[in-house]
Amino acid sequence: MTERTIAIVGGGITGLATAYYLQKYIKEQQLPYRIQLLESSKELGGFLKTEERDGFTIERGPDSLIARKPSSFRLIEEVGLSDTVVGNATGQSYILANGKLNKMPRGSYMGIPVQVRPFLFSGLFSMKGKLRAGMDFVKPRGKETGDQSLGLFFRKRLGDEVVENLIEPLLSGIYSGDIDQLSLMSTFPNFYQLEQEHGSLIKGLKTMVPKQPKQKKKPSVFRTLTGGMSSLVNAIEERLDEGTVRFETGVDHIQRKEAGYHLLLTDGTVLKADSVVVTTPHKETERMLSQYDFLSPFKEMPATSVANVAMAFDQSAIKEDIDGTGFVVSRNEDYRITACTWTHKKWPHTTPDGKALLRVYVGKPSDQEIVNASDEEIQRVVLNDLNKVMNIEGEPEFSLITRWKESRAQYTVGHRERMETIREEMRSQLPGVYLAGASFDGLGVPDCIDQGEAAVQSVLAYLQQ
């Protein structure tokens, strides 16, 4: 049989998962296929970047994996890193609202109250706000509808206070976007289904969230790797066959030919491929396939910028110590930071004894210019906000600022329908080309791995038909 080539464009976690699982199936089934993973930079991993400095382990991108999503941990096991998985050390987190840090109410799911008692005693909401949220039990289910914004859906069920002081700060940390613009059906379609089935979002969630037995210590919601998130990237790269990855090789254009595709590369050469998996951000994807008008919605698809600021201190500099993993900030507060992780408490292995490591985020949808500010200005803003609630003495021993510009694709209302239309057109006009990655069907690391695995099955089915 003639050897066939599969090109993977982009070496982030989606491209890496695609390459790993493709290679696995090719070897198991002894298929005459070769893989070419094209990465425009000098290193793999995309947003997964870990830096070691002065004994600190600092994540420049995501710092954890959500425990209830299995695909990450399945891949971690496959590449031999299971013994490096650890859960967060302390479970208490806070919300900065009404001018103070409030404990995250127990018995909530993604900010939605499932247990009534902790919610009633929370200082996050006024009595009026609590009564309004309770209306979810008696309000009729919403009319069957197409897509709508997350904000509109939650406001109708639970009222403005719960949305702005609890749900929005949590979800904005995931999507870095405006909850009143984000698509319900592309982010949490299960919430809509629960409301339709049970007439109440809270009642529906009670049936979905299993009762936790009483335990002295709650199981970890988040997990990470003691070697940092880059250790997963490195472990996958080590298992890819020599010659699979081509660094500093971008793609200018993808052209369909009578037999397969030609990828015009930035080094001036052409790669011929029988199937292509594109894992790049949506604007890059549209540029590579600009001759196809059906991809034009990607031109208008917004993306927000964020910066994370890691700051190292001597423990003695933190004058007001708080036991917990960190806090998120309500949109109603006069702060420019959106969240702060007390990394030395959440992940003790990352920080030398006697030291403190804080990781702070800036870049609200309404405050994008802060991401482009100088390091000195960002540090000044961050310390000014932190000192309103924490009392930190002096300057950090060092800070490390990472800017992710236009990195967070925004799944605005109608995103799922647009993606369905695009994929339908691709099946017709670009058979054998598949999209996977954070711009398309889920932003998180497990979602990207899931999309990579799905792309593998699509490629194999296409080449074997």
Image (cartoon, grey):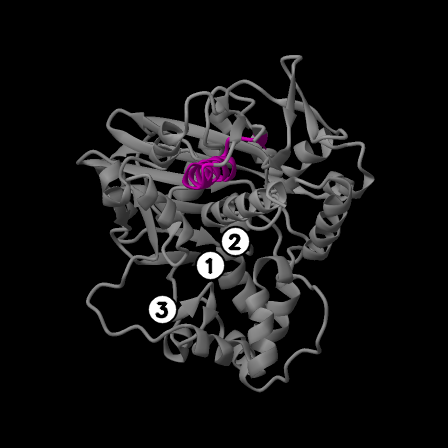
Q: Which residue is mark 3?
A: 106
Q: Which residue is mark 1?
A: 97
- Regarding mark 3 in the picture, which secondary structure is present there? loop
* Residue 273 visible within the image: yes
Please tell me in which quadrant of the rendered image residue 39 appears: top right
- Number of labels in the image equals 3
**What are the residue bounds of the magenta stretch?**
5-30
Question: Which class describes the residues within 10 Å of circle 2: few (<14), some (14-19), or many (20+)?
Answer: some
13 inside magenta stretch:
yes
Cα–Cα span, label 1 and label 3: 16 Å
Residue 453 in percent (x, y) is at 50, 46
- Between disc 1 and disc 3, the foreground one is 3
Cα–Cα span, label 2 and label 3: 22 Å
- Regarding mark 2 in the picture, which secondary structure is present there? loop
Question: Which class describes the residues within 10 Å of circle 3: few (<14), some (14-19), or many (20+)?
Answer: some
Question: Does label 2 or label 3 sit earlier along the sequence?
Answer: 3
- Image point 54% across, 33% down: which residue? 404
- Image point 63% across, 13% down: which residue? 267
- Image point 45% across, 49% down: which residue? 446
Kind of residue at badge 3: Arg
Question: Which class describes the residues within 10 Å of circle 1: few (<14), some (14-19), or many (20+)?
Answer: many
Question: Does label 1 or label 2 sit earlier along the sequence?
Answer: 1
In the figure, is residue 34 to the left or right of 238?
Answer: right
Cα–Cα span, label 1 and label 2: 6 Å
Question: Does label 1 or label 3 sit earlier along the sequence?
Answer: 1
Kind of residue at badge 1: Ala
Labelled pair 1, 2 in contact (Cβ < 8 Å) = yes
* Residue 384 visible within the image: no
